[in-house]
Amino acid sequence: MKDNGIIEKIYDIATSHFHKWYGLLSALLLEAIVLLFVYGLVPKGEVPFGWYVMGMSVVAIIILAGWAFYVWHYPKRSKDRLGVAIAVQIENSEDAKFFKKDFLTPFKSKIHELDLPFDVLVLRNHQSETIETIEDARHVLKKTRAHFCIWGSIKKRSGAPAGEKYLFSLRGIVIHRPIQEVQKVLLRKEFDALLPNTVIFEENLEFQAFEFRANQAVTALDYITGRAALLSGDFNTAIRLHESLLKAIESGQSFPISEDALKKLLSLEYDQKAGFEFFNPPAAGTYQESIRKSLQYDQNNYGALLKRAIVEFNNGNGDARIAMNTIKEAKNHAGGGYHWLYSKAFLHFWLEEYNDALQCCEKLKEKSYGGEEITVAEVILFNENLLKTYDKPQLYYWLGFVSIVKNKNLSIADKYFQQFLEHANDSTKDLKTRAESYLSSIKKEIGY
């Protein structure tokens, strides 16, 4: 009986502390005892003792290799999916069973149900024990090649008079390239904020609490993956993830993200999608549909309103007056931006409202913003395409103005102003005077 107690103790150390050197030693000792017992059952003389020693050596090498793999190997994500490493430290094997059944299983099921592109990489308990700081979590991300790490602990403590209580702590970190470092920091803070650090609950509520934490983790992953995708320019992934999350919220599920905040984010994502589609035309109607969806989620989306005005103008086939009203609406939600001023100036030129157009031009001389060169390039391309179809000489003046004031390209501006004067008529006298003045200045500057 005493021997059985010793063997049970060795077995317990080998299974509970296999990652430690004494766990390995216990496993090797247990192997020797088992093989010696087996050898004792074999009739004497049939198997030489040397064979026993050789067999024990082979098994010992296998155990040693298994120990090295168990201690140092980390699971790794596949190349075509995102990785989320789960590193939760658990104090005893009984709680580990609850964690696997009531947290990991619902977590994986939810990811599968939402069709999220994740490999779930569960670290062993001894690996989870080493993670205490953000730097430790970064080390795990490198080892697993994952984009996310959710780490924490489950501890059971006596909570008299209520009895045993669980303390379930979670934290999160995200790394997503090729976004800028400042954006990574913001995402990490958002991710961490979506995982309330410690939840305390009674032992008899373990299933509900574990499942609740699993839903929190999935929600955080869903939301932050979409945010990271958007920052990386992948608006399609962002839309797919966030629309699935919105549907869950609208169905009555409780999440730490408000429905309004998610709708504004989706509006931004559809606006970016529309911007891409405008310059890379896919199937007919997709661009308009993206604008419609953007404004459906947020009727005050500034970028989407500007794009709706383009649709309403419809390359000269639509209603410029309706487009002008939309631009005025966009102005109210510009938040300090001045993209709308280019659209307003153009529409006034198109409608032959030259005094209003020139007032916009004077304001544009005073205004500037980051990325304005992109707007200028878009304005030039848009107007050049219209001039291939329409006899609108005033657009040559508009192009000349943009080229000299914003692009600082005197030779191109000279070309546009010359073209304007060649096609101008009596209704554009004021524009002619201004164009001649610009041409005179250009001549003095470049000396031709």
Image (spheres, rainbow, N blue to C red):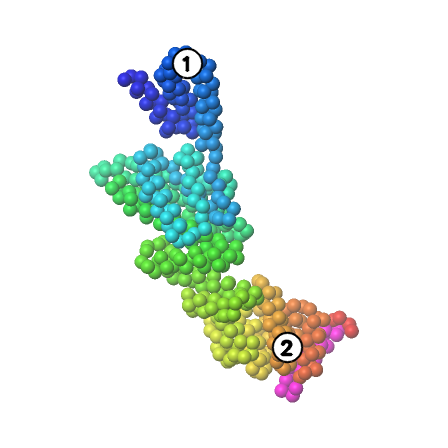
Boundaries of the magenta span: 425-444
| Mark sitting on residue 16 | none
Nearer the N terminus, badge 2 or badge 1?
Answer: 1
SS for dot 2: loop
Residue with the most extreme front position: 46
| Residue 291 shows up from this direction | no
Q: Residue at x 69, y 81 (%)?
A: 421
**At which x and y percent is residue 325?**
48, 77
Residue with the most extreme left position: 161
The label nearer to you, 2 versus 1, is 1
Q: Is residue 413 left or right of residue 261?
A: right
Q: Residue at x 74, y 71 (%)?
A: 445
**Residue ID for mark 2:** 388
Among the 4 quarters of the image, the one containing residue 165: top left
| Structural distance between the alpha carbons of marks 2 and 1 | 100 Å
Amino acid type at mark 1: Glu
Q: Is residue 260 left or right of residue 72?
A: left
| Mark sitting on residue 46 | 1
